[in-house]
Amino acid sequence: MRVTLDSQPGQPDQPGRDNEDFAAVAPGAAVLLDGAGVAGAETGCTHGVAWFSATLGGLLLSAVTAHPVRPLADCLADAINGVRALHGGTCDLVHRASPTSTVVAVRVGADAVEYLVLGDSTLLLADGDGKVTAVTDRRLDDVGKRLRGPVDALPTGTPEHARALAEYRDALTGLRNRPDGFWIAGPDPRAAEYALTGTASRPSLASVSLLSDGATRLVDRFELESWEGLLSVLDASGPREVIQRVRAAEDGDPEGRRWPRGKAHDDATAVHWTLT
């Protein structure tokens, strides 16, 4: 078995800006989180988005490995509760702009691979014949499509785009962790109940890959690759090459005219775990 990982910030030209993605691997387990906040909004929290995703990710990986038979959703709920405790009563955790994060987690056993996906990050399950199954929580995307028309109509980086993006994010936040909206890891451990979970036969799989939406842009936004094509890049050259191809496409469309998007560049993270 071999694991490769790469994570790159979306705005390297902004000194002091943290990468809000987090990924880590331990024997038999891997996690990937894509942190999110509301740009320019008061959060009521003294901790940043990067702190939230890294802390939650570390606690989740610890729970997954320390309790090998505990369901992944329960491990996520435990980790969210752990992060709440670390806030130490200093933060307003019910504030609507508090930090949140997507979550992908896998536990690899001798017979089965267990997985959990919450939010718009993606898990790829590839069998020995190269067939790929993409597990993605589409609820956030479905809500976004209903709301982001005014954002996509404007060039990325313009003041008008920034104002429309702020309004879009505010509306999106109002639908967070609601039955008519979408679910994401935040201060409420009940969100873990709404994660997509499942198992796959370990002997049938050749690899598992965890990707933040900054890395999947090559497929689901730019449509420059299929999932099978993305897997071929991961197998041949690893996660760094995938992210470099995303960056090349973004650099060729800095204003988002061909591919409308909230940011010209987003944090991008990929983990590729070869099982055979």
Image (cartoon, rainbow, N blue to C red):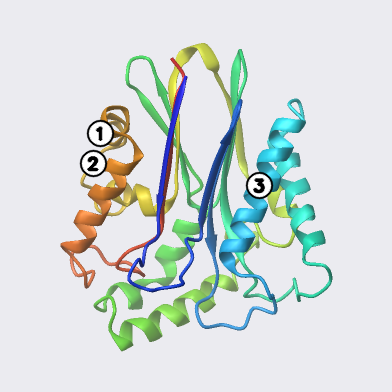
Compared to 135, does 13 lie above or below? below
Mark 2 — residue?
225
Give the SS element for disc 1: helix
Give the SS element for disc 3: helix
Q: Residues within 10 Å of mark 2 (few under 14, many from 20)?
A: some
Give the image location of residue 141, x and y in percent.
44, 57
* Mark 2–mark 3 distance (CA, rounded to whole Å): 32 Å
Give the SS element for disc 2: loop
Give the image location of residue 260, x and y in percent.
27, 67
Residue 107 can be seen, yes or no = no
Three-letter residue code for mark 1: Gly
* Mark 1–mark 3 distance (CA, rounded to whole Å): 31 Å
Q: Residues within 10 Å of mark 3 (few under 14, many from 20)?
A: some
Q: Residues within 10 Å of mark 1 (few under 14, many from 20)?
A: some
Residue 192 can be seen, yes or no = yes
Q: At x 26% / y 49%, what residue is drawn?
A: 244
> Residue lying farthest front?
15
Three-letter residue code for mark 3: Gly
